[in-house]
Structures are given as C-alpha cells and as structure tokens.
Image (cartoon, rainbow, N blue to C red):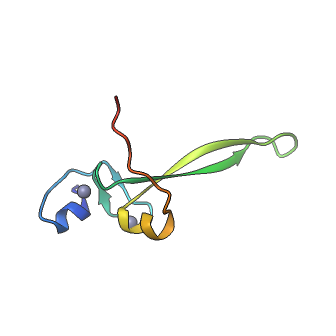
Amino acid sequence: MHCLDCRTTGSNSPCVGVCQRCGAGVCAEHARIATHSVRRGPLIGTPAEAEARTVLCPLCAATEAPTAAAPTPAP
Ligand SMILES: [Zn+2]
Ligand SMILES: [Zn+2]
C-alpha cells in the first residue's frame, strides 16, 4: 500500500500506518500521531492512566487533533 497524500502529489511512498479516521495509508512523512490517555485499573481503588496512540493523516489530524505530531525517526 502507498501513501494517499504522496500519491496525489505524484510520488509513491510506502505507507507506515493507516489513518484511523478515513482509512488512508500514510507514509512516515505524512503520518500524525495523536496520543490520548486511557483509564485502566480496578473499578475500586486508584485508577491508572496509560498513553494510547492514534495514527491520523494530515487532513484528519488538522480537523480532529491539531496537537498530533509527526513521528520522530528512531535514533
Ligand atoms: Zn506521504
Ligand atoms: Zn484521515
């Protein structure tokens, strides 16, 4: 599968993820990672919070998660 946004500009980058909103394939350059905290743990007692992530394309990220950031390359 190829990145949808790259395809519209004429290039063919392989996608590294899939937008969780529109289902478009996104390459490393176009992927946007939004994080949100999920509550988990026992119903009674102190709940724990964990960070979950959502992959979005630039278009969906702009409308739904303006704070979503591009993934940083591994060192
Ligand atoms: Zn792309
Ligand atoms: Zn999308």
In the picture, measured across the screen, residue 50 lies left or right of residue 12, that is right
Q: Where is ligand 1, by quadrant?
A: bottom left
Residue at (75, 41) in percent of width and height: 41
Residue at position x 35%, y 54% from top? 31
Residue located 32% across and 63% down the image:
24
Does 38 sit left or right of 70 as displayed?
A: right
Left or right side of 68 for 17: left
Where is residue 52? Give x, y as percent. 56, 47
**Residue 63 rendering spot, x and y as whole percentages:** 46, 71
Is residue 22 visible to us here?
A: no
Q: Nearer the viewer, residue 51 or 25?
A: 51
The quarter holding residue 44 reads top right
- Of residues 31 and 19, the one nearer the viewer is 31
Query: Which residue in the rendered view is the most extreme toward the left?
Result: 10
Image coordinates for residue 22, horizontal then vertical, percent: 39, 68
Q: Position of residue 56 (x, y in %)?
A: 41, 59
Q: Is residue 45 something one can see in this rendering?
A: yes
The answer to whether 30 is drawn above or below residue 64 in the figure is above
46 versus 18 height, above or below? above
Which quadrant of the view contains residue 61? bottom left
Q: Residue furthest bottom?
A: 63
